[in-house]
Image (spheres, rainbow, N blue to C red):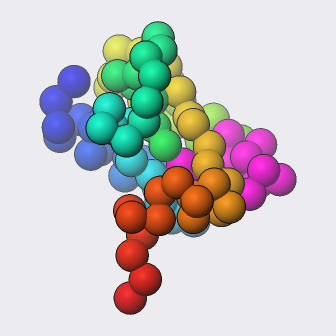
Amino acid sequence: MTRKTRTEVLRLIEKATNYLYPLRWVDEKTTTGDFDGREVAIDVFLIPTANQVDFLTQVRPIRGLIREMTGHRCIFIFHSPEATIAYYSHLFPVT
């Protein structure tokens, strides 16, 4: 999958979810462990557990388009605000 496609997919998801949560494609440097679908996995940060179903509902209308663009279904890995702060604070510096 090209860098351009990856960027376009993230932008589609951001727009569908009103830019509420930081997103990124899974990075093998900071996400440990090997799993099927790593190449199509997206980290969703700062998302409370109570909001995860709403996120998936907002993304549902564009999932077919994303599948066409990537050739696969995307896997979302949710990180609560607490987990984001504990394990990924280096990605979100305080300004």
In front of the other: 4 or 93: 93
- Residue 37 seen in render: no
Residue 74 position within the rendered picture, expressed as x and y whole percent measured from the top left: 48, 26
In front of the other: 23 or 4: 23
Residue 86 position within the rendered picture, expressed as x and y whole percent measured from the top left: 58, 59
When the figure is inspected, residue 79 is found, relative to residue 21, above or below; the finding is above
- For residue 6, what is the image quadrant? top left
- Residue 92 seen in render: yes
When the figure is inspected, residue 59 is found, relative to residue 50, above or below; the finding is above
Q: Which residues are magenta?
A: 44-56
When the figure is inspected, residue 94 is found, relative to residue 78, above or below; the finding is below
Residue 52 within the segment the image draws in magenta? yes
When the figure is inspected, residue 2 is found, relative to residue 17, above or below; the finding is above
Tell me the chief SS of the magenta region. helix
Q: Please tell me which residue is depicted at 39% across the width and 47% down the height of the picture.
A: 24
Lateral position of residue 3 relative to residue 67, left or right? left
Residue found at the far right of this picture: 50
Lateral position of residue 41 relative to residue 11, left or right? right
Count every numbered label the image shows and give the total: 0
Q: Please tell me which residue is depicted at 35% across the width and 15% down the height of the picture.
A: 71
Q: Quadrant of the C terminus?
A: bottom left
Residue 65 position within the rendered picture, expressed as x and y whole percent measured from the top left: 43, 29
- For residue 67, what is the image quadrant? top left
Lateral position of residue 26 relative to residue 22, left or right? left
Lateral position of residue 32 relative to residue 59, left or right? left
